[in-house]
Amino acid sequence: MEKSPPDIKNTPKEQQSSQDHLSAMIRDFWQQVKNSEQSLNELDILDIMKNINNLLYENQLDVIAEITVGDTKKHKILFTADGKIERFEYVIEISRQAPDLQFFEVEAFRQRINNVDTFVIKSKESSFSLGATDLLIQYKESCRKISIGIMFAKTVPENMIKQAETMALVYLDHLLGEYDFAVRVEAVDFLKIDQSATTIPANQFVTIFERSWKEDLKHTGIFNIQEDQWIVFELTDLKMLVHRNEAANSLLGHENYCYALNVIVDVDSKETLSLVYELEDAINFALRADEQGIHCQNSFSEGVRNMLWYVGNKQSVLQLVKQITN
């Protein structure tokens, strides 16, 4: 008697359809850029930026293009979500699917500033500004990420506090880079100045942030080729049993494994559970074979098994899982 396949709640087919639609929009955008590359190259930087952003808008790609001088080519197109994490996928996929252009190179996300010691953010409404020594930072590990506390080392007028806090967040975004500030930072709090507190000037924080991320939290970005290291615990309030793979910890938050493949399956019998184990093993084997992804967590609650992997190329992984589940 042939076994019935397990009931997968979120099917790769549905996810694939959404991904195909995004890819089509991106493909159309890049074709238009490529067709007009010669004429774009003859414009000044502001007009290039205006034209490319118009093409993004026409193709319903809700991100922003900024133009700078290129490292290896004449211009660089930098795509940013302006801190909106729900649009990070657009930035990643637009950059990943970029064609080879003659005059333009492509970069995803605003990067960290190089001139930390001299970088200053100025208020548009007043003479108030924030520089590297005007922000004092405390940090701690929190939920496998880093939480930040900020103190102002200069006097902030009462009517400027909200604006100063906004400026400080923008400063951190430039200091850590758009991706790391959104993904690696758990929370940011503004603290009252405390002369006895141990703090770090903003211009020294990047080095400490990197060291804490890689050495203390062990998020090295190196794919762990060793065997999985599972720990088990129960969330009693949720009546949920959780298996977490510590071998996947090294890839948490890494830009090359920034997607989560989530497979949710109803388990109503031992036979179904056996089929789910087979499905899980097949996905694991396929993803690990060429380091496309790593199994990071399973949970079980009220007859539903939820399996989670960190993966890189969403399009190819969805196709792979679709083949396996078929």
Image (cartoon, helix red, strand yellow):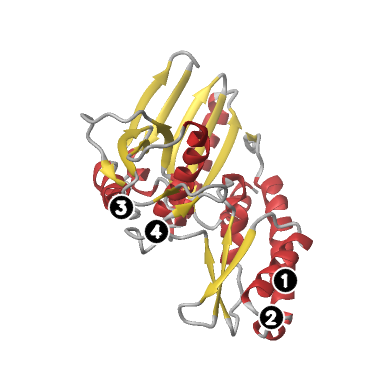
The mark nearer the N terminus, 2 or 4, is 2
The mark nearer the N terminus, 2 or 3, is 2
Tell which of 94 and 127 is nearer to you. 127
**What whole-number distance in Å separates the C-alpha atoms at marks 2 and 4?**
31 Å
**What whole-number distance in Å separates the C-alpha atoms at marks 2 and 3?**
37 Å
Report which residue position mark 3 lands on: 203
The mark nearer the N terminus, 1 or 2, is 2
Between disc 2 and disc 3, the foreground one is 3
The residue lying at 40 percent from left, 30 percent from top is: 243
Pinpoint residue 228: horizontal percent, then vertical percent.
Answer: 33, 43
**What whole-number distance in Å separates the C-alpha atoms at marks 1 and 2?**
8 Å
At numbered mark 4, what does the secondary structure look like: helix, strand or loop? loop
The mark nearer the N terminus, 3 or 4, is 4
- In what quadrant of the picture does the N terminus appear? top right
The residue lying at 60 percent from left, 71 percent from top is: 98
Report which residue position mark 1 lands on: 51
**What whole-number distance in Å separates the C-alpha atoms at marks 4 and 1?**
29 Å
Report which residue position mark 2 lands on: 40
Residue 228 visible within the image? no
For the residue carrying disc 4, how many other residues have a C-alpha within 10 Å: few (<14), some (14-19), or many (20+)? some
**What whole-number distance in Å separates the C-alpha atoms at marks 3 and 4?**
9 Å
The residue lying at 37 percent from left, 30 percent from top is: 191
The answer to whether marks 1 and 2 mark residues whose Cβ atoms lie closer than 8 Å is yes
Between disc 2 and disc 4, the foreground one is 4
**Numbered disc total:** 4
The answer to whether 146 is drawn above or below residue 291 in the figure is: above
Report which residue position mark 4 lands on: 119
